[in-house]
Amino acid sequence: MDGSGPMSQQPNWYILAKRYPAVTLLVVLSAVGGMLVSFSSHTAIGYFSFGGMDDGQYWRLITPIFLHFGILHFIFNSLWLSMLASRIEEVMGTLHLMLIVVTTGVMSNAIQFWWSGASNFGGMSGVVYALLGYLWIANSIAPHPFMALPKGIVPFMIGWLVLCMTPVVTFLLGVGIANAAHLGGLLSGMLLGLAFGLLAKLKNRVE
């Protein structure tokens, strides 16, 4: 065989998008949210910021995770999302990953709103911390080689979370940091990791 069949002609991004459809969808929606903020921040905040329960706009419980304020914000979150979420989607499946994202996205958004009282926040970083917490705890209970985190990533990310709670990062970047969303995401992800980790361990024992 000369390797010139249809599969060999598919670009890497297409292969990865097909393998990780949920991760791809989340990155694309984040890009759309970032463009919406850039071109029409009034529309983005008005229709997709947290809130809307009184008006029946329940999508606004989750949509702030897709709003990104600047290209670096989008790139940073998308890289972490791709690295962490792909592990979960590969092992646990697309629906499992989306369950985690929606649950922890709503939780981190609600905690940020409760803490700050403001609705003009956004970004995938709360979910990123949730995925980190999920992988950290779940893989500690029921280890899987593909779900193992790179060495040092947990202390690095927790250190960054703590640093962001000081005025240093806000001063250097010139923007506010949704620290409550980060912490809320981490804790909710750890709780889900505990629950599903225990279920996986029990399942392995039964089998």
Image: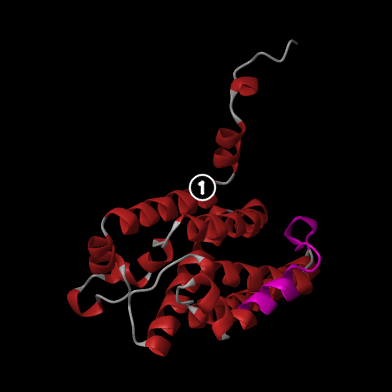
Tell me which amino acid carries mark 1: Thr
- In this view, the residue in front, 142 or 3, is 3
Magenta residues span 144-161
Residue drawn at the location 75% of the way across and 55% of the way down: 146
Residue 72 spot, x, y in % from top left: 51, 57
Quadrant of the image for the C terminus? bottom right
| Vertical side of 76 occupied by 20: above or below | above
Q: Is residue 32 magenta?
A: no
Residue 186 spot, x, y in % from top left: 59, 77
Q: Are there few (<14), some (14-19), or many (20+) residues within 10 Å of tag 1?
A: many
Q: Is residue 152 magenta?
A: yes
Q: Would you say 117 lies left or right of 164 here?
A: left
Residue extending farthest to the top is 2
Residue 184 spot, x, y in % from top left: 53, 81
Q: Identify the residue position indicated by label 1 in the image.
A: 24
On the image, which quarter does residue 164 sit in? bottom right
Residue extending farthest to the left is 55
